[in-house]
Image (cartoon, rainbow, N blue to C red):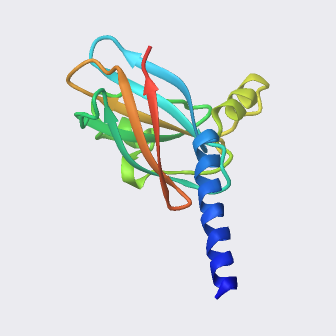
């Protein structure tokens, strides 16, 4: 009975330590922010510095409102991202546009690593980049990203400049 109690305490401590570690060292990395003055549209460049893939769950804007449209561009370093008025059609297909819940952010995709490769001329189409692309009816001041890592739901909030 004592061994079971000790084991449960150790397990609880490990779970708590994991939550604290992830809170102070989130695996989702936010980088470049691109916006459009004509229509409230933004792209938030993201990457993964963690040990396993990240599953995006939801994206909201401002006061946790559902955006008019939100998708993920799964592109590559030489191609980059593009602001899209419409997430359908050939251009959206070219930039790998998928639904939020279909996007899996692979490990080793930190934007700083990709930028370094671009700077020294070694970036290739194999260097995957990810951008959350959002269109909304009102100005976008904040982007809220909910994602899953190791089965734990985590949140990031991005303030737009």
The image shows a total of numbered marks equal to 0
Q: Inspect this view and state whether residue 58 appears.
A: yes
| Residue occupying image coordinates x 74% and y 22% | 119
- Say whether residue 45 is left or right of residue 145: right
- Say whether residue 75 is left or right of residue 72: right
Q: Give residue 37's position: percent from left, percent from top.
A: 33, 11
Q: Give residue 91's position: percent from left, percent from top.
A: 38, 35
Q: Is residue 15 above or below residue 121?
A: below
- Say whether residue 125 is left or right of residue 35: right
Q: Looking at this rendering, what residue extends furthest in the top direction?
A: 37
Q: Quadrant of the C terminus?
A: top left
Q: Nearer the viewer, residue 123 or 26?
A: 26
Q: Nearer the viewer, residue 4 or 133?
A: 4
| Residue occupying image coordinates x 27% and y 29% | 63
Q: Looking at this rendering, what residue extends furthest in the front direction?
A: 2
Q: Quadrant of the N terminus?
A: bottom right
Q: Nearer the viewer, residue 149 or 21?
A: 21
Q: Give residue 29's position: percent from left, percent from top.
A: 59, 36
Q: Inspect this view and state whether residue 99 appears.
A: no
| Residue occupying image coordinates x 30% and y 26% | 62
| Residue occupying image coordinates x 46% and y 49% | 147
């Amino acid at each position: 009975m004592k061994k079971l109690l000790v084991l449960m305490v150790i397990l609880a401590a490990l779970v708590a330590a994991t939550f604290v570690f992830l809170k102070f060292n989130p695996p989702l990395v936010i980088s470049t922010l691109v916006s459009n003055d004509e229509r409230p549209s933004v792209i938030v460049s993201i990457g993964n510095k963690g040990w396993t893939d990240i599953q995006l769950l939801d994206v909201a804007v401002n006061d946790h409102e559902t955006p008019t449209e939100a998708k993920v561009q799964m592109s590559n370093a030489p191609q980059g991202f593009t602001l899209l008025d419409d997430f359908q059609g050939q251009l959206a297909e070219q930039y790998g546009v998928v639904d939020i819940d279909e996007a899996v952010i692979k490990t080793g995709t930190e934007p700083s690593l990709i930028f370094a490769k671009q700077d020294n001329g070694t970036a290739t189409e194999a260097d995957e980049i990810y951008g959350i692309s959002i269109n909304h009816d009102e100005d976008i001041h904040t982007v809220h990203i909910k994602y899953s890592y190791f089965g734990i739901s985590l949140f990031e909030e991005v303030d737009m400049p």
